[in-house]
Image (cartoon, helix red, strand yellow):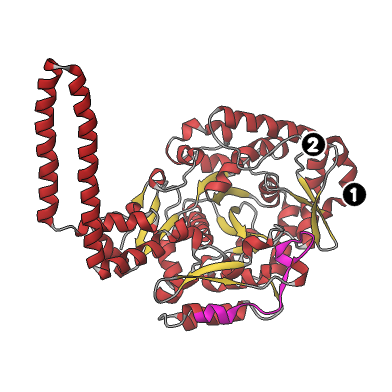
Amino acid sequence: MQPACIRHTELPGTSRLFADFSYHFEKVAKFYRHDPNAASSLKRAVAEIDYPDDRRAALVKALEAQNGPSESLRRLAEPGTAVVVTGQQVGLFTGPAYTIYKAVTAARLARQLTEIGTPAVPVFWLATEDHDFPEVDHVWVFNTSGEPVQVRVDAPVEAAGRPRPVGGITLPNPPIQLLQEALAGMPFVDEVLEAAEKAYLPGVTMGAGFRALMQTIAGKLGLIFLDPLDPAIRKIAAPFIVKALHAAPELKTALLERTRELTHEGYHAQVHVDEKTSLFFLLENGERTTLRRKDAEYAELVNRAESISPNALLRPVMQDYLLPSVAFIGGPGELAYLAQSHVLYERLLGRMPVMFARSGFTLLDARSAKLLHRYRMTTAQAFVPQDALRQQIARELVPEAISKSVDSAKTGIAHHLDALHSELKTFDPTLASALEKSRAKMTHQMDKLARKTARESLGRDHRAIADARHLANLLYPHRHLQERFYSILPFLAQHGLDLVDRLYDAAEPGCPDHRVFTV
């Protein structure tokens, strides 16, 4: 079934910056180098790429050591091949479902570029350097009853204390058994568990497990995975880090000014920047610690460039120094902080890829699609807390005769009060004012009666209560969009591993809307 579309402005939590990026790009154009909606942007971005042959050769060699040989790497080794890059934190069992949506969008755009004469391959940046383990040590799935279940890994000793890059943290006992218990009874659970077990062997690192599972479930996409913790990658990036260290004072000034510009225009700064903000971390003894010093003193660290890690704003610029990137696929938060990173791109690279929003999906099973139809609701109307959803369903359950009678009573009362108000206004304006207060009370009582009737209807229909719970848990679990809350794994266990192929076919790079896909 072809996906239906929902504008992001209908989704809860959409920022003004992302809404304008999606639908009114001219308002935010000065914060980015290219307009993703302009057909000429990709050609311009390709023309701006100045990527030395020696860097390409070194990168391909490093990536082959990480990934093994592949057709995508063979193509990347050829001069002129560009990259569509995306990435994600290395969360347990691939993290939220939108991780896969990023991958399919990048792969789809790379194919489209290749078909129109610009050879391109998709690269997935593994955010192994991030050091917030509690963000990635768990994943949410749902069971056969549709109830959310959290699967969490016990924090290894090395994850405690000082911050460590999560990609290198080992998992002595990955929670495969918990995953099995949560997904038990689903049609394709055995395939999913087999993939998870092979990827998350005892003693695997967070980064390696993430990559191995992604390679299994998204293997047909032709992704090349890049782990920036690899010493070979750090060596290639060292000249960029040296340049950034020398330019630290200028970069900080530019970021502070960009933050002021964003807030002046009524937007938010995704990453907080102030006079004390550091753009650099130090990777040493397995730890990642913020470098705190005067901006002018960072240049003294050039001899340690291979041990220095960029912060969230500098990281994408280093990424596009390492790669011949023509386009980047990101989510709303990433596209927001790239509005800040733009000033770093201009000063350090003199170019910037075209920024595209990833395809977003809400997946419906057959039951959920039928329930939305039964209760005459759109998917967007279900993105509300469960109590509000139950009230919506309750209103649909009130017998038609009663609904018509209540509406008729309200209309009749309003008509008679309007006539009385006209008479009183001529006779005594103070009495007319008193009538308006009485009108508000009567309207309130009629609305209260309608709500009580709806609640009574819902209380008599136990199936409807279960339906509301099912819809809430699937579409807006714990008040989050489905793609931001659940892993892709329960959907694969429910619909098969070829779901990724169907999502690939449904992805539309450049389409600004969120998509509702009935599986």
Counting from the top left corner in percent of width and height, residue 83 is at 59, 53
State whether residue 477 appears in this view. yes
Q: Is residue 483 left or right of residue 254?
A: left
Mark 1 secondary-structure assignment: helix
**Relative side of 304 to 321, left or right:** right
419 or 511, nearer to the observer: 419
Q: Quadrant of residue 173?
A: bottom right
Q: Quadrant of residue 463?
A: bottom left
Q: Residue at x 62, y 51 (%)?
A: 80
- Image quarter (top left, top right, bottom left or bottom right) of the N terminus: bottom left
Query: Residue 108, how many percent across, how many down?
Result: 48, 57
Q: Amino acid at mark 2?
A: Ala
Q: Crowdedness of circle 1 by 10 Å Cα count: few (<14), some, many (20+)?
A: few
**Disc 2: CA contacts within 10 A as few (<14), some (14-19) or many (>=20):** some
> Is 115 located above or below residue 210 in the figure?
above
Nearest to N terminus: mark 2 or mark 1: 2
Residue 303 marker = 1
User: Does residue 405 appear to the left or right of 270 in the view shown?
Assistant: left
Q: Is residue 174 magenta?
A: yes
As helix, strand or loop, the secondary structure at mark 2 comes to loop
The residue sitting at 52% across, 72% down in the picture is 217
Instruction: Name the residue tied to disc 2.
Output: 247
For the C terminus, the image quarter is bottom left
Which residue is painted at 79% across and 37% down in the image? 248
- In the depicted view, which residue is nearer to us: 415 or 424? 424
Q: The disc labelled 1 sits on which kind of residue? A: Asn
Q: Does the stretch in magenta take in 353?
A: no
In this orientation, which residue lies closer to the viewer: 236 or 228? 228
| Residue 247 higher or lower than 378, as above or below | above
Looking at the picture, how far across and down is residue 166, in whole percent? 71, 63
What segment carries the magenta color?
Answer: 160-181
